[in-house]
């Protein structure tokens, strides 16, 4: 059954929440009195559709239904999750909670995107305080997995677990903050860095550009995959964290930072920072900067995914939850037709300078399809570990139409030959009904002990015989066996 989320406040954060839920198959209702809310969320959705699906190596659920509501009560009635992202004014938030709790299901989760207020402040005077919890995201909400979940004693353990489970189901990483504190965990670090950066600019030590370069060329990359303490553990060498703290601990007593002081926000300081920021990146619109940010985030997170580390491990876990049923098994597939062996969105890092899917990624996609067909036939990881596998001897690819980032592609595979040690596959890549490319692969079954061709197991031979019999009436595909065409 499709779940439904209500988004209260459709700004940058609310729009990100809407995209995260919607692209993970939830229906989404939005309430925001801003007459520009629909346009703003539409623009956020465009960026999200281009980037989020490409983080997954399996297809996301079918996109839910997005609707906009003029009345708060209509937006929240009967929904599973309510996400409040209104401006950071406590009186406004409490007023919103009063109105929505009068209309919503008592079993719904009410999450607040607040970056500063404690949950006990939000629960004060509420009709059902046990229903309200802080769920603080990070921008862009549709890409970054971290959500700080901050409850109070009024929230039952069952309620908190329910909230965490629902967040996990849409690809978030819920960080359970077990003791409420102003600004939670992550923003307290950001506040410390922000204070120090303001002093460095005010004192003329560094410009906004130089500060950003210091972060993104150095420790920012380390933090993205190891965080703070693990980075310092490595810095301690073989002796580890104890050695690092013994060596660098005394430096904490030196007057390096000004964390307890904040420079006065004079007009002069504000103008200085704004002017430097304009010089740094004013040549880009905000939407262009968002796309640049998304491109970089997707590339880094997919690199982490290959290592199953940090945010990449969260993505792999979400893929594993989505994978069952995404592609058919031998018994589930209609073997009389080409078998669906790949379904996914084209990631941002699969495109080239023309905005098209780059040539090498067609081979990636068809290689994944070959791997999936091998799995279907019984040549899976366990079989390979036992000493047998198929090696590719030859591949041909035809490029028939353009493919762009975010496109939902599907590969269907016809087996042209599956007898003895030989396996001949023909892959067709589609976007909807549009044929984008074909890939033809010839493989030989080998013994991994001596790297020589040999017959596969009896189980694999039987599986291939089933496919051979079922696909016997299929026509030989156009383009199969062709060499490179001569120029006209």
Image (spheres, rainbow, N blue to C red):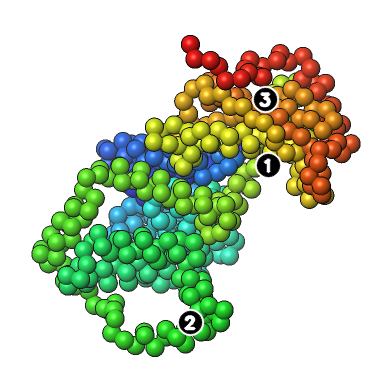
Horizontal placement of 468 versus 338: left or right? right
Q: Is residue 230 visible?
A: yes
Disc 3 to disc 2, how far (Cα)?
A: 56 Å
Identify the image quadrant of residue 31.
Answer: top left
**Position of the N terminus by quadrant:** top right
Q: Is residue 346 above or below residue 336?
A: below
Task: Name the N-terminal-most of marks 1 and 3.
Answer: 1
Q: Position of residue 123 (x, y in %)?
A: 41, 63
Residue 294 position within the rendered picture, expressed as x and y whole percent measured from the top left: 40, 46
Residue underneath mark 2: 244
In the image, 116: left or right of 479?
Answer: left
* Classed neighbour count for the residue bearing mark 3: other residues with Cα under 10 Å, few (<14), some (14–19), many (≥20): many
Please tell me whether residue 395 is drawn above or below residue 29 in the rendered image.
above
Alpha carbon separation for disc pair 1 and 2: 45 Å
Residue at left offset 56%, top offset 59%: 309
Q: Which badge, 3 or 2, is on the more N-terminal residue?
A: 2
Residue labelled with disc 1 = 324
Disc nearer the start of the sequence (1/2): 2
Residue 485, quarter of the rendered image: top right
Q: Which residue is mark 3?
A: 426
């Amino acid at each position: 059954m499709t779940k439904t989320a209500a988004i209260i406040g459709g700004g940058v954060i609310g729009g990100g929440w809407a995209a995260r839920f919607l692209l993970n198959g939830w229906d989404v209702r939005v309430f925001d009195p801003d007459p520009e809310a629909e346009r703003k969320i539409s623009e956020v959705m465009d960026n999200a559709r281009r980037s989020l699906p490409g983080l997954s190596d399996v297809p996301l659920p079918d996109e839910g239904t997005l609707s906009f509501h003029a009345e708060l009560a209509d937006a929240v009635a009967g929904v599973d999750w309510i996400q409040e992202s209104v401006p950071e004014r406590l009186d406004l938030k409490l007023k919103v909670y009063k109105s929505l709790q009068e209309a919503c299901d008592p079993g719904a989760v009410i999450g607040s995107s607040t970056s500063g207020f404690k949950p006990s402040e939000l629960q004060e005077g509420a009709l059902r305080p046990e229903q309200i919890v802080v769920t603080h995201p990070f921008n862009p909400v549709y890409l970054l997995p971290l959500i700080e979940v901050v409850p109070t004693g009024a929230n039952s353990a069952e309620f908190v677990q329910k909230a965490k489970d629902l967040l996990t189901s849409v690809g978030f990483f819920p960080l359970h903050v077990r003791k409420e504190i102003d600004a939670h965990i992550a923003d307290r670090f950001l506040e410390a860095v922000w204070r120090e950066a303001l002093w460095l600019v005010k004192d003329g030590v560094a410009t906004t550009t130089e500060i950003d370069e210091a972060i993104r060329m150095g420790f920012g990359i380390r933090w993205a995959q190891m965080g703070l303490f693990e980075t310092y553990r490595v810095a301690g060498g073989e002796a580890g964290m104890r050695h690092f703290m013994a060596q660098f601990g005394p430096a904490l007593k030196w007057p390096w930072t000004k964390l307890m002081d904040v420079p006065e926000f004079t007009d002069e300081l504000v103008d200085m920072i704004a002017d430097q920021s304009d010089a740094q990146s004013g040549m880009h619109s905000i939407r262009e900067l968002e796309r640049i940010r998304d491109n970089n985030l997707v590339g880094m997170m997919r690199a982490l995914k290959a290592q199953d580390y940090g945010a990449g491990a969260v993505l792999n876990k979400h893929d594993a939850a989505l994978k069952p049923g995404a592609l058919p098994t031998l018994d589930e597939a209609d073997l009389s037709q080409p078998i669906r062996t790949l379904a996914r969105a084209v990631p941002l890092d699969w495109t080239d300078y023309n905005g098209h899917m780059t040539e090498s990624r067609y081979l990636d996609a068809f290689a994944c399809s070959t791997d999936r067909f091998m799995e279907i036939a019984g040549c899976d990881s366990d079989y390979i570990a036992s000493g047998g596998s198929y090696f590719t001897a030859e591949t041909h690819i035809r490029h028939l139409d353009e493919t762009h980032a975010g496109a939902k592609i599907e590969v269907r595979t016809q087996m042209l030959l599956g007898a003895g040690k030989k396996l001949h596959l023909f892959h067709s890549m589609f976007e909807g009904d549009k044929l984008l490319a074909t890939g033809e692969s010839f493989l030989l079954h080998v013994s991994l002990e001596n790297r020589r061709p040999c017959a596969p197991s009896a189980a694999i031979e039987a599986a291939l015989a089933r496919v051979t019999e079922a696909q016997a009436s299929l026509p030989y595909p156009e383009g199969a066996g062709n060499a490179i065409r001569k120029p006209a």
